[in-house]
Amino acid sequence: MTAADAVSAADDIAPSQGGGGGVDHGGRDHARRDDGGRDGGRRDNTADSDVAGAAAIRLAAQVNAARGEIEQRMGILLTEASPERLVATMPVEGNRQPYGLLHGGASVVLAETLGSVGATLDAPPGSTVVGIEINASHHRSTTSGAVTAVATRIRGGRTLVTYDIRITDDAGRVTCTSRLTCMIRSGRPTGSREPEPS
């Protein structure tokens, strides 16, 4: 998925956010004040949270429609997407190493997918996002079911974005923690192609 695809998906959900928020052409969420000053500057955080949550779910569905080959093969599905926080699941079956355990590399692919999508959602139009550093600590093995990854943005910048990614098993136990730094570059890489719709 390119930054332009992510921005297009974000623009599609902006009208449904009404007066509580919007998305600019950089994909960044901006809260707008629309209470006429009646509440002394306070906002209904629950309503804002519900709107943001619904928007994150819709955006995740749109990102899933533009998944790359590896995400499709590994069964990675986003359930929530915003530049600040992303959630995805991945089946263990089909992503195991010869001992029957979830392959550590599969966890790294899951982590890099989430961080890269998050950075892309916040990148300017026409940009390319590339992962430049990732680390992972594998804490526990898992042999079946699915894992869930939650990526939280640690730092966002114009050229570098860093995410903390925590992967858990079906019982909620942490199987892997990871940190990813992405670089945002202007323009598209030579020889790149537009993703084909699924």
Image: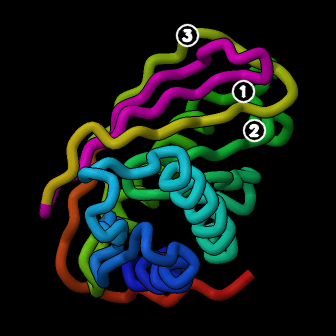
182 in the magenta segment: no
- Left or right of residue 48: residue 96: right
Q: Which residues are magenta?
A: 158-180
- Crowd band around label 2 with a 10 angstrom C-alpha radius: few (<14), some (14–19), many (20+): many
The residue type indicated by label 3 comes to His
The residue type indicated by label 1 comes to Leu
Callout 2–callout 1 Cβ contact below 8 Å? yes
N-terminal label among 3 and 2 = 2
Q: Main secondary structure of the magenta part?
A: strand
Mark 1–mark 3 Cα distance, whole angstroms, equals 12 Å
Q: Circle 2 is placed at which residue position?
A: 95
N-terminal label among 2 and 1 = 2
Q: For residue 140, which quarter of the picture?
A: top right
Q: Circle 1 is placed at which residue position?
A: 102
The picture places residue 141, in percent across and down from the top left corner, at: 69, 13
- Left or right of residue 195: residue 78: right
Extreme-front residue of the structure: 38
The picture places residue 108, in percent across and down from the top left corner, at: 51, 37
Scheme of image coloration: rainbow
Q: Which residue is pictured at 68% across the width and 75% down the height? A: 65
Q: Which residue is pictured at 52% across the width and 73% down the height? A: 17
Q: Which residue is pictured at 64% across the width and 46% down the height? A: 88
Q: Circle 3 is placed at which residue position?
A: 139
The numbered mark at residue 66 is none
Mark 2–mark 1 Cα distance, whole angstroms, equals 6 Å
Which is nearer the eye, 68 or 124? Answer: 124
N-terminal label among 1 and 3 = 1
Q: Secondary structure at mark 3?
A: loop
Q: Secondary structure at mark 1?
A: loop
The picture places residue 67, in percent across and down from the top left corner, at: 63, 69
Q: Nearer the viewer, mark 1 or mark 3?
A: 3
- Left or right of residue 25: residue 81: right
